[in-house]
Image (spheres, rainbow, N blue to C red):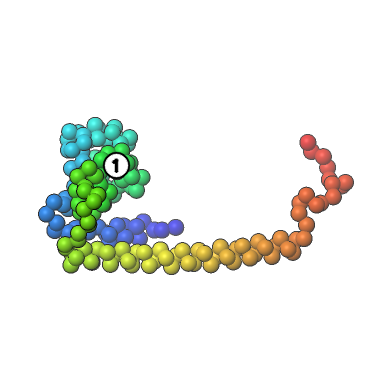
Amino acid sequence: MISHEYTNKMREKFRFSINYTCMDETIHDRIGALVQEYGDGKNTVFANKIGISEGNIRGYIKGIMPKADVLEKIVRTLDVNAMWLLTGIGHMRVSNLDINAPVLVSDNDRLAPILQQFDVFIQKKDAQIVQQAEEIGRLKERVSQLERGKGKNASDVPTSGVANVG
């Protein structure tokens, strides 16, 4: 189980801001901008559109980190660019994107440290996946050994001395 302290540490590690001209600083600011755009400035209207409580929206604007399922609801329900919502990079609306235009990253110097932070996180997850795969392999082998050692299935047991309960 992941500790509360570790979770907060990881959140702080992945909270980042880039001085990007069209970017709101935090995800909280971007959610506030979405309330203005899609809810006419009213948390209740916005919350109803995406199917969550007004109190949750208020909390997200004040600094509570939204969960992934809420972010997914925002992106799927509204015309919102997921990249913009998560990072502030790009346009707010998906409809403002030109899908035929090449994606240009002009601020490589500012973007590289952000991507490096994700590399560390990905490496930890990869190590965890390898560890879990090894354990799954050991468990499969143990199950196989137990099945071979038992030699009989439950259906092979003679029923002559077994009480009939049904």
Whether residue 105 appears in this view of the structure is yes
Which residue occupies the foreground of this view, 102 or 86? Answer: 102
* Image quadrant in which you'd find residue 70: top left
Residue 148 quadrant: bottom right
Q: Quadrant of the C terminus?
A: top right
Q: Along the horizontal axis of the image, is 154 left or right of 23? A: right
Q: Residue at x 17, y 35 (%)?
A: 41
The structure residue drawn at horizontal position 17% and vertical position 59%, both measured from the top left corner, is 18
Type of amino acid under label 1? Ile
Is residue 30 visible in the rendered image? The answer is no
Q: Residue at x 25, y 47 (%)?
A: 81
> What crowding class fits label 1: few (fewer than 14 Cα within 10 Å), some (14-19), or many (20 or more)?
many
Q: In this view, does 11 lie to the left or right of 101?
A: right
**Residue 14 location, x and y as percent?**
27, 59
Quadrant including the N terminus: bottom left
Does 108 appear above or below 82?
A: below
Along the viewing direction, whichever of 165 and 128 lies nearer the viewer: 128
Query: In the rendered image, which residue does mark 1 sit on?
Result: 74
Residue at disc 1, secondary structure: helix
The x and y percentages for residue 6 are: 35, 60
Number of marks present in the image shown: 1
Q: Is 136 left or right of 129, judged from the image as shown?
A: right
Q: In front here: 162 or 73?
A: 73
* Residue at the right extreme of this rendering: 160
